[in-house]
Amino acid sequence: MTGDTDLSPARLRHARYAIAAVFCTHGAVTGSFATRIPWIQEHAQLSAGTLGLALAAPAVGAALAMPLAGRVNHRLGARTALRVLLSLWTLSLILPSLAPNLPTLCFVLFVYGATAGMSDVAMNALGVETENRLGRSIMSSLHGMWSVGALVGSAAGTVAAHTGADARLHHLLAALVLTAFGLLAVQGVLDLRADQEEAPPPHFALPPKSALLIGAVGFCAVFAEGASLDWSAVYLRDVLHTDAGLAAASTTAFALTMAVARLVGDRVVDRFGAVRTVRAGGVVATLGGLLVVGVRHPAGALAGFGLIGLGIAVVVPLAFAAAGRSGPAPAQAIAGVATITYTSGLIAPSAIGAVADATSLVVSFGLVTLLAFALIVGAAVLRTGTPVGQAGDDLGGETVKAGSPDLDEPAQNRP
């Protein structure tokens, strides 16, 4: 392995804060974009149906581009690859508000999604490597920082929309600020490079079987997340007949419990291990789903959506961490898990709507409850068979530091 040789506690702490800032930057782009979707829809003169079609393009772009991230990491090294990919992602924020019609918007959102996906894989792979060297869980809090960034970006976008600011100007300024902040943050991350004799990964390759199983667990969590975020307010309004303000509070309850749980989740993982944490989360999310479908009262539904958010919060971060420890090509495995979870996020809202049209929203959230229960059953796949430190390569070729812990085990049981 070449690159960073300073693995002192102070250097590793600095690297952790730096990668956390990268996650925050990534989330802020998403939040900035989401708040101006109504402006973009009006500017491009789109109906609700055509807007839905355009909003599928980012997931398609991400799914197709993610497998390339490992090769970019191998060629450029982890820090340079992240610098390039994160900058492309932050600058791509400029594009959607410039699109004058549906074909152009679909194209720029495809590019937007592709840069999002590749930078997502690069930062998660480097997050896993930082976690390995620190010897304790950090992936949950990193994803919590992504949520913080999304909230900050959303807040700024809400202010811009409230003041009637042109989204083109808003997104130009936001992109420039976030690009500068991202470049500054990347300076502090670990600089890992593949050995010169290491063969580069293929341009496109199917993820290993272990990543498919881990991705299935992530699929369940992201499906529940997408369904709850997009349909919780509709559920309270249409099924429980609440007013708009109380209905919106369900989405807030869900998002806040997820963000808080992710920020504190590393302590739980360090104490109980990844498998026990996900099983307990599955129990909590299942209870939340049962409250939503079984208690026909707004208080029960609000509590239920909050419990779903609490239960699934750490699943995706732990899935990425498990993928990064599952074999000799962590970037490829992480890309596979990310592709599966992106796909889940794409199909969840429409699947919930289709089931609701055929039956009812109560039945739709019965499906969410079953997927939450599946986390209890499937948590064991997050227990990787090869301890970190014996897994071989990372980020397209770097050797994992010997003696790094297996985070499937509670901290007190690790060597």
Image (tube, rainbow, N blue to C red):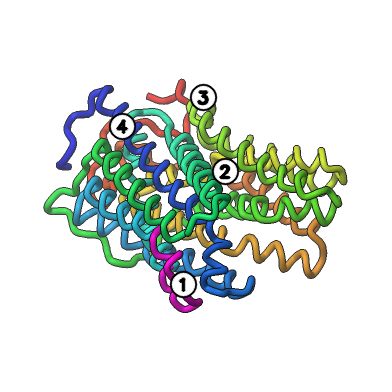
Magenta-span inclusion, residue 99: yes
Q: Furthest-top residue in view?
A: 412
The vertical placement of 243 against 262, above or below, is below
x and y percentages locating residue 359 in the rendered image: 82, 66
Q: Residue at x 53, y 62 (%)?
A: 343
Residue 332 seen by the camera: no
Q: Of tags 2 and 3, which is closer to the observer? A: 3
Q: Which residues are magenta?
A: 93-108
Question: Whole-Å distance between the Cαs marked 3 and 4?
Answer: 18 Å
Q: Residue 67: which quarter of the image?
A: bottom left
Ranked by sequence position, the earlier of labels 1 and 4 is 1
Residue that numbered label 4 is attached to: 133
Magenta residues, dominant SS class: helix
The vertical placement of 22 against 403, above or below, is below
x and y percentages locating residue 115 in the rendered image: 36, 60
Question: Whole-Å distance between the Cαs marked 1 and 4?
Answer: 42 Å
Ranked by sequence position, the earlier of labels 2 and 3 is 3
Tag 4 secondary structure = helix
Tag 1 secondary structure = helix
**Amino acid carrying mark 4 in the image:** Arg
Q: Describe residue 243's horizontal placement relative to residue 97 as left or right.
A: right
Residue 255 seen by the camera: yes
Q: Of tags 2 and 1, which is closer to the observer? A: 1
Question: Whole-Å distance between the Cαs marked 2 and 3?
Answer: 16 Å
Residue that numbered label 3 is attached to: 271
Ranked by sequence position, the earlier of labels 1 and 3 is 1
Residue nearest the viewer, comparing 99 with 50: 99
Magenta-span inclusion, residue 339: no
The vertical placement of 212 against 181, above or below, is below
Evaluate if marks 4 and 2 touch, with contact meaning CB atoms under 8 Å apart. no
